Image: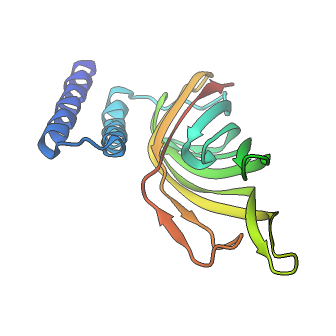
Amino acid sequence: MQSEFFLNWRALRIDACIIFKFHGMNNSFEKIFVTVLVLTLSISICAKAQTKSETYTAKNAVYLEVGGSSGRYAINYSKIFHQKGKLKLNASAGFSMWRNKINDFKTYWLPVIPLEVTALYGKLNHHLEMGFGFTSLLDRTLFFDSGSLELDDKFVFDAFIPLRVGYRYQKPKGGFFFRIGYTPFFNVPVGGRKNWNFEPRFAGISFGKSF
């Protein structure tokens, strides 16, 4: 079974190289997308190599995410709140402060709160992860004051809804935590935005510890 796993994984890596050469992918995002896709497809192979499900005793994790549902970056806490066989349900919440430079004289640090619910499918360490979230933040924007005929700035509420499909490495008894995912998102029509807006080109990576 182990030899079959490594043979199939090598085949996936070769297929990815062929895809890059065939399509002439110079765009870094396209390369990231295909990498995430190959990792996601490898989950089924990992499941074959792991023949026994194990109940998770280390259901908590703390990690740093760059990109993804955090937008730019955030420190997050997550917890597996349900497990049945290969399926696990997970919820996470995070916090970040984003730097927003209005002009040469004004710079603000604004709070960001990413929330996410995901489903994990897999045995032992390797999982396919799918889900969605809601990320809220305060922003600062310039506007024209018709009374004083001057530019002024004000706080506005902003939000986006990230989607996720990717790979997650988490051990049943705790330790190193890692995940990578394709995370397109919808901008919510708030804070002066009048329409929904979809951004398909986004991804995220996380490192941390489960316990």
- Quadrant where the image shows the C terminus: top right
Number of marks in picture: 0
Name the residue: 37% across, 34% down.
47
Where 110 falls versus 146 (above or below)? above
Instruction: Judge from the rendering whether residue 127 lies leftward or rightward of residue 11; answer left or right.
Output: right
Q: Residue at x 16, y 46 (%)?
A: 23
Which image quadrant for residue 146? bottom right
Q: Could one spot residue 128 in this view of the protein?
A: no
Q: Residue 164: where, in percent of width, then height?
A: 50, 51
Residue at the extreme right of the image, as rendered: 148
Query: Can you say which quadrant of the picture contains the N terminus?
Result: top left
Q: Position of residue 83 (x, y in %)?
A: 60, 43
Render colour scheme: rainbow
The quarter holding residue 43 reads: top left
x then y, percent, for residue 206: 56, 33
Left or right: 42, with 150 as reference point: left
- Give the x, y percent position of residue 111: 78, 48
| Residue at horizontal 48 percent and vertical 32 percent from the top | 53
Would residue 66 appear left or right of 100 to someone viewing this image? Answer: left
Up the image or down, 176 lies above or below 135; here it is above
Residue nearest the observer in this picture, 39 or 195: 195
**Front-most of 207 and 175?**
207
Task: State which quadrant residue 88 falls in.
Answer: top right
Q: Nearer the viewer, residue 97 or 170?
A: 97
Q: Is residue 47 visible?
A: yes
